[in-house]
Image (cartoon, rainbow, N blue to C red):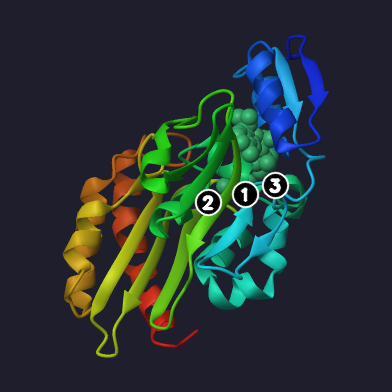
Amino acid sequence: MFVIPDRFSYTVAHSVEEAVELLHTLEDSKVLAGGQSLIPFMKLGYASPKSLVDINRIPNLDYLDDSGESLKIGALTRISRLCDSELVAKDYPLIHDAALQIADPLVRNLGTFGGNVCHADMGDDLPAVCLAMNAEMVASGPSGQRVLAAKDFFVDRFTTLLASDELLTEVRIPKNRRGCGGAYLKLERRVGDYAIVGVAAQLEVDGDGVCRSVGIGLTSASTKPIKASEAESWLVGKSLSDEVLDKASTLAMNTSNPLSDIRGPAEYKKAMVKVLTHRALKLAYKRARGGL
Ligand SMILES: Cc1cc2nc3c(=O)[nH]c(=O)nc-3n(C[C@H](O)[C@H](O)[C@H](O)COP(=O)(O)OP(=O)(O)OC[C@H]3O[C@@H](n4cnc5c(N)ncnc54)[C@H](O)[C@@H]3O)c2cc1C
């Protein structure tokens, strides 16, 4: 049931510094990016901030830059840009897979990478991608900038490590080298829905197909986005046979602790974590070996 949100002030920030200053000084403030999660939350009465700080007019926060050591994604980069980018499609298939499966074109045109990860919903798709890719999250606050590891960023459902007066400005994704491949698989009730469960897998294999490193992030598999750490540890140093992938998928399933809800009972979701982990690892492996 929708409700009329409580009164709130609305201020437009024109720079990162101004946004941080506003977040610091205004009472009970929240960042407004694409508004695709925050506005529905306010209409549903789940959030009632007293002040909104609109960051959409801050220049230079919408970019994809792979000129350095990592792929840098500006926090205001719209999800649709990830879908349309040749660079992302070619070199970062895990991000591309996930972006294409988020909601519908209207939501993707407004929703931002930063908003999706800062919302920190267990059902949002990009947090699992950041976990699998060992991303770094760059935050600006009153005392300057700090860089947070994705594995520490997602504290609880709708809660990140960001302070209330900090702004996420950039997400840094390690560059895909030769031998790297990734995939995101999502089970949904219908196209555009939130995940029943989703699995992000990112692998690096050597010339013999032995796993050098791996990241596995899970969507809707707990009350917050989680990493399947035991499965990751099990895979490193092994040839990725079906038996090995099966054991890793079982470990990922055992790590998961999904909620029963309108998208299915917890037992079903756990079983699907196993199925999707196996398939996502297999596809990531194929891509790492140069296949599509
Ligand atoms: C119909 C519908 C279907 C959807 N389906 C999916 C789906 O299948 N998968 C999926 O992943 N998502 C889905 N979404 C959510 C969508 O992807 C949102 O875009 C995203 O979750 C939030 O991004 P936003 O830019 O709109 O953020 P906002 O709604 O503006 O903000 C979300 C939260 O993040 C905070 N925030 C935003 N940016 C920053 C920042 N730079 N620094 C600090 N805090 C910040 C805000 O204060 C707020 O708390 C759906 C949304 C709708 C409306």
Ligand 1 quadrant assignment: top right
Q: CA distance from mark 1 to mark 3?
A: 6 Å
Mark 3 C-beta to ligand 1 under 8 Å: yes
Question: Where does the N terminus fall, quadrant-wise?
Answer: top right
The disc label shown at residue 76, or none:
3
Residue depicted at 21% across the width and 49% down the height: 254
Q: Residues within 10 Å of mark 3 (few under 14, many from 20)?
A: many
Give the number of the mark in front: 2 or 3.
Answer: 3
Residue 41: % across, % down: 64, 25
Q: Secondary structure at mark 1?
A: helix
Q: Is residue 173 above or below residue 89?
A: above
Mark 1 / mark 2, whichever is N-terminal: 1
Mark 1 / mark 3, whichever is N-terminal: 3
Q: CA distance from mark 1 to mark 2?
A: 7 Å
Q: CA distance from mark 2 to mark 3?
A: 14 Å
**Mark 2, residue position:** 126
Mark 2 C-beta to ligand 1 under 8 Å: yes
The disc label shown at residue 72, or none:
none
Q: Residues within 10 Å of mark 1 (few under 14, many from 20)?
A: many
Query: Label 2 near label 1: C-beta < 8 Å?
Result: yes
Which amino acid, mark 2?
Answer: Leu
Residue 82: % across, % down: 66, 62
Residue depicted at 60% across the width and 69% down the height: 66
Left or right of 126 in this view: 250: left
Residue 198: % across, % down: 44, 54
**Mark 1, residue position:** 113
Which amino acid, mark 1?
Answer: Phe
Residue 130: % across, % down: 46, 53
Viewer can see residue 86: yes
Mark 2 / mark 3, whichever is N-terminal: 3
